[in-house]
Amino acid sequence: MTDAKPAPVLEAKDIVAGYGEVDILHGVSVTVHGGEMVAIIGPNGAGKSTLLRAIFGLLNARRGQVSLKGQDITNRAPDELVLRGLSYVPQVDNVFPSLTILENLEMGAFVRETGLAERLDRVFSLFPDLTDRRGEKAGRLSGGQRQMLALGRALMLDPDVLLLDEPSASLSPKMVDMIFDRINVINAEGTGVLLVEQNAREALSVCHRGYVLATGENRLEGAAKSLLDNEEVGKLYLGA
Amino acid sequence: MASPVGDLPQLSIWVEVGLLVGVPLYAAVFAALFQSLVGYNRLRSSSDIFTAVTLWLLVPLHIGGWLAYQYGGSLEALLLLTIWPYVWLTAVVYGLPRIEQLRSHDDNINFGGIIANIVVFVFAAAIWEHDALTVGIVLGAIIALGAVGLTLIFGVLKFAHFAHGDSMMLSAFVAWLLLNGIIVGERAGSETTLLPVNVNDLPGAESAIWDFSFGYGLIVAMLLAAVLTAGLMVGIDRMVYRRLRKRKSDIVIFAIASLGLAFVMRSVILIFWGPTPRLYTPGIRNRIDLPFDVSLLADQVFILAAAFVVTAVVYVLLFRTKLGKAMRAMADNPDLARISGIDTDRIITWTWAVSGCLIAIAGVLLALQAHLDSELGFTLLLPLFAAAIVGGLGNPLGALVGGFVVGITQEVAVTFDFLSPGYKFSVAFAVLILILVVRPRGLFGERS
């Protein structure tokens, strides 16, 4: 191959989706290459979260195509997607509050029978805070620890791509740094990450590339650094 | 023997009025004092005052006052006084470790208080009404089994399964059919043998084990009925509820559909077995004596043992197996369960199967405690729901505790002179209302 860039792992093309009669996405395309960390930023109501839900089959895509490692996965059920290597962490309600931390992680690996112990070890080494509290109910965790547990649950199947919906929402600045640091580590170990962020500056400073969505359409895309320096982006979303 | 506190005089009506008015006042002052002591120095709302007053002092004092009035001056009055240190002990045990939490989780005071009151109530019942307590425990075990199934269905499918009581009775009759193969004939009094082979044909199936009124045949019939009911419940889900799910019907539609099924089941019982109450075995029911002046029917010992075994199995299933954990996960957060890749259809099927087994066993045990009666299932619906809600809807452990609370309260309450046994089921309702006022999410319910 002459192209230096690795092949795309996750590719969403021309996605049209919405709720009821109303389309929220009018043909959005995003791509995640192997081992890449990509941010989707944009104002409220741009359709960022809707895009993740459509990619994960929680929302029917009316048009367009989603493919994972070259195979079509448009509108497939979540249990098939997690087996194929895609995981999703919703913004809220992303843990099982009355289950223990250990049980939450086990549920993340529900579809696979083997190798539970090693993957648990990996998650606990990524999030040492959870290790001592594995027998505690997830409902008792703080916001930051909940987010760690949610990430841990999504990692239990060693996904190729992780979809994260606002991982930094309603966390303290210190916790935001901590979570992004962990996401960086996860990414460095080879997992592709596609994350939606309100916190655009933080997101772009850790990601490789970024997409800017507005009113359900692609507005801009490029290397994260160039987006950070981009005047239009700066004016619109970074408050520069 | 002279009691150390001397004989209390019979209390006059004015003392009772004084108790009714003075005790709440005293309790209110105490509650304010208590709350300021633990740094909870702002009575945030009237419900906090109500809660603290009722839970920590009012109920035990009222029970105490009433009992003192009943038993003025006797040994019982002494026991009443000895209850006090116990109340305090409970209060301290539940209160002290939670003082820190009280500041952030202001409703632990409710939880501790309710538990303290349940303990005091059961303790008092054990002293004064231990026969009713015994029956209450037996009935509580049956209600608990039913309520665990009810709460599982609610947790996973999020609707109130109104056919629960009638399914219990239907499976009890199915066990009866398996046992002797009989349904009623075309004319009153005549009987038709339906099954060519039945459980009682097995060698020695009818000869009584130990002091029980039945042989191993009933246990076999019960287990067979459990399998059949599990199948029936899964079948009903396929035919009715799954279609509703596919149409994304409202929760109310599910509940109404289950109510319709309840009528169907009761009619099926009436068609096949008629309205006459029946018993599994005509045999004599032996009473056995246990330590501490407790005596109960041998069959009731079986009920308790069976309930214990089934509860243990359900506990292992829910908390130690992947399937059970997935059921709880789905009850917790169905969307996240789907996102995690849990096959929700399969979990729903298993939930019905497990609930079906619980329904059948609870039904047979109920019929063994009372009798087989087409109306009994529906009557039991209120205590079942009360138990599930008292424990916290969707929480199996809560349903278990709730079952015993409702069963015991029902039986003990109707021993009071002013409450006729006919009000048994309204006691369940009263318990339900009390819990809804004091702790709407139930004893073990998660904060939403």
Image (cartoon, grey):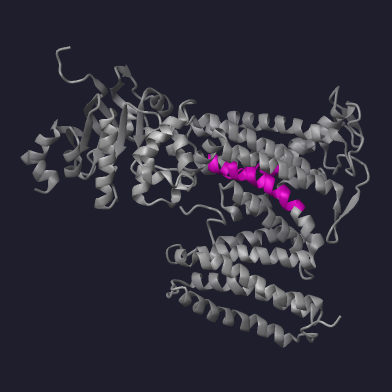
In this rendering, the count of numbered labels is: 0
Residue B389 counted in the magenta span? no
The quadrant of the image that shows the N terminus of chain A is top left
* Residue A91 screen position, x and y as percent: 33, 43
Q: Is residue B74 visible?
A: yes
Res B41 → quadrant = bottom left
The residue positioned farthest toward the top in the image shown: A1
Is residue B235 toward the left or the right of residue A76 in the image?
right
* Residue A193 screen position, x and y as percent: 27, 32
* Residue B323 screen position, x and y as percent: 56, 33
> Which stretch is magenta?
B138-167
The answer to whether B102 is drawn above or below residue B194 in the figure is: below
Is residue B288 toward the left or the right of residue A231 in the image?
right
The one of B198 and B102 positioned closer to us in this rendering: B102
The residue positioned farthest toward the left in the image shown: A231
The one of B392 and A183 positioned closer to us in this rendering: A183
* Residue A216 screen position, x and y as percent: 22, 35
The answer to whether A85 is drawn above or below residue A133 in the figure is: above
Residue B164 counted in the magenta span? yes
Is residue B79 toward the left or the right of residue A230 in the image?
right
Res B254 → quadrant = top right
- Which residue shows up at 79% across the image and 85% down it? B6
Majority SS type along the magenta span: helix
- Which residue shows up at 44% across the image and 47% down it? A133
The one of B306 and B232 positioned closer to us in this rendering: B306
Res B433 → quadrant = bottom right
Is residue B108 toward the left or the right of residue A209 in the image?
right
Q: Is residue B167 visible?
A: no
- Which residue shows up at 77% across the image and 35% down it? B222
The answer to whether B354 is drawn above or below residue B308 in the figure is: above
